[in-house]
Amino acid sequence: MKNRIWILWGLLLLKFILQYLLIDPVYELHRDEFLHLDQARHLAWGYTSVPPVTSWISYLIMLLGNSIFWIKIFPALFGALTMLVVWKTIEELKGGWFALTLGAISILFSILLRINTLYQPNSLDILSWTLLYFALVKYISTEKSNWLYWAATIFALGFLNKYNVVFLFLGLIPAILLTKHRQIFRNKHLYSAAALALLLISPNLIWQYQNNFPVIRHLNELAATQLVNVNRADFLKEQLLFFFGSSFVLLAAFVAFTIFPSFRKYRMVGWSFLFTILLFVWFRAKGYYAIGLYPILLAFGAVYLEQILNGKRGKYVQPFLLILPILLFFPMLQIAFPNHTPEEIRQNSKLYQDFGMLRWEDGKEHTLPQDFADMLGWKELAQKVDSAYAQIPEPAQTLILCDNYGQAGAINYYSRNKNIGAVSMNADYINWFRLDKEIKHVILVQEASDDDPTRTKEKPLFETIERTGEITNEFARERGTSIFILKNAKTNINQIISEEIEERKNKP
């Protein structure tokens, strides 16, 4: 038992170390991270982009100083906790030291290393899925109804973090009906637990209702601009890569559900995987949406492999299987992480292209993976906006208006002026405009694809318009983004902005 604990603590420590080592210093924060951090300054029960849990964590990060260390510690922590839950699941399935170590290594050397480098809801989402499955395993093995209440609470936490967990819920229903566990629908505690979950998520549902369900508009926009470019075959290919190094453990799990007597009562987990994957394929989901399905399968696969390798000959195979996930994952360390400079990636572009990593959401091939390009150019933008801000004689009456949430969030994070308050008509920023003061000047930040580079729309509204700079980093997704200073308004800018906000909010 003592040796097991040392193995666990050693792997958890390695997890935290790797999360910091796998990001080259040339990269900045990701555009999504800026948005989530800014939510801490606008606490609410819901947002256009995500439910509220991320904002609570961001508020804690802000209290701790908003440093890169604290921003990165939370996704790493959620990844470590996912490993711990898999460990506890293996213990519940009566697995020994080999199963425990194999399960933990399989989690450590997987796509979770990449997911856990970014401060996004995804890390907690995967942990929530794993915890929910763990609660169901505990309920099946103990038949104690208190685990239904734990499952309901975990579902509510997952829902308040990312709506993606609804797919797990939908996949579980037919999975339960296909097994003997359908008798659970006769258990009154199931409905009490469901009521608890509904109560916990109700503040967010009320917020959605009061704000005309922005989640629906967000999903429609996502489907029209991103998911439409998702190829269903590519989705399935990505599933093979996420846990490629431990794919033999996943295969063992499916075999175990079929032929291993001790796992027959847990077949619901296997069916749940199938139905949830089919739902994702049908809706053209992004590949990473399904990652939360895999950690629990690794627990079952590790225990089954330990059972079939318990013989004398099997003892010689076990060390090899513990090393195999590391060896197979090693090539992914070369391409799946921002641990190489943009120039190094360009020189080895064929390798990235072969793995489909240069294909962005727009369906086109680019120089860098999209996530990497989204981590460049932000400091440059903030510095140039600060320079423009310094040229305005009345900064208190100046609005920093950006084309997208990444620009606004990056300026707010990297600017020397922490009260600069950049906003955008994009994402949650549309709700964060301060129109309680007269706006006389505007610093306009526009994407390179701007269809009005000479500012013909704004010329009648201001006395002078000057272009002061642009993002020049050739590898940044925001390359070419321009900064304009619009001075001395000749009309009521507050009213114009207020009307545009209302028009966009009411747009179907």
Image: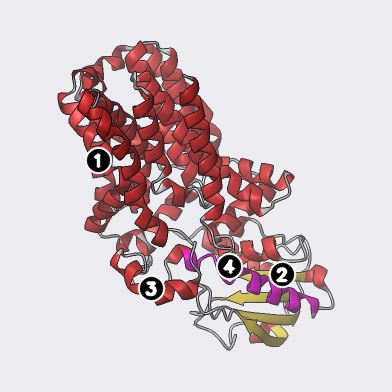
Q: Secondary structure at mark 4?
A: loop
Magenta stretch: dominant secondary structure: helix
Of 254 and 14, nearer the camera is: 14
Label 4 – label 2 distance at C-alpha: 30 Å
- Is residue 163 toward the left or the right of residue 26 in the image? left
Which residue is under mark 3? Answer: 348
Label 1 – label 2 distance at C-alpha: 56 Å
Q: Nearer the viewer, mark 2 or mark 3?
A: 3
Which residue is under mark 1? Answer: 248
Q: Amino acid at mark 3?
A: Asn
Q: Secondary structure at mark 2?
A: strand
Label 2 – label 3 distance at C-alpha: 42 Å
N-terminal-most mark, 4 or 1:
4
- Is residue 71 toward the left or the right of residue 362 in the image? right
Q: Secondary structure at mark 1?
A: helix
Look at 42% across and 17% down and name the residue there: 147
* Classed neighbour count for the residue bearing mark 2: other residues with Cα under 10 Å, few (<14), some (14–19), many (≥20): many
Q: Residue furthest right?
A: 393
- How many callouts does the rendering have? 4
- Checking the image for residue 399, the label placed there is 2
Q: Amino acid at mark 1?
A: Phe
N-terminal-most mark, 3 or 4:
4
* Classed neighbour count for the residue bearing mark 4: other residues with Cα under 10 Å, few (<14), some (14–19), many (≥20): few
Q: Can residue 365 be seen at all in this image of the molecule?
A: no
Q: Looking at the image, is 375 positioned above or below residue 131?
A: below
Percent of width and height locating residue 487: 75, 82
Which residue is under mark 4? Answer: 26
| Circles 4 and 1: CB atoms closer than 8 Å | no
N-terminal-most mark, 1 or 3:
1
The boundaries of the magenta stretch are 372-390
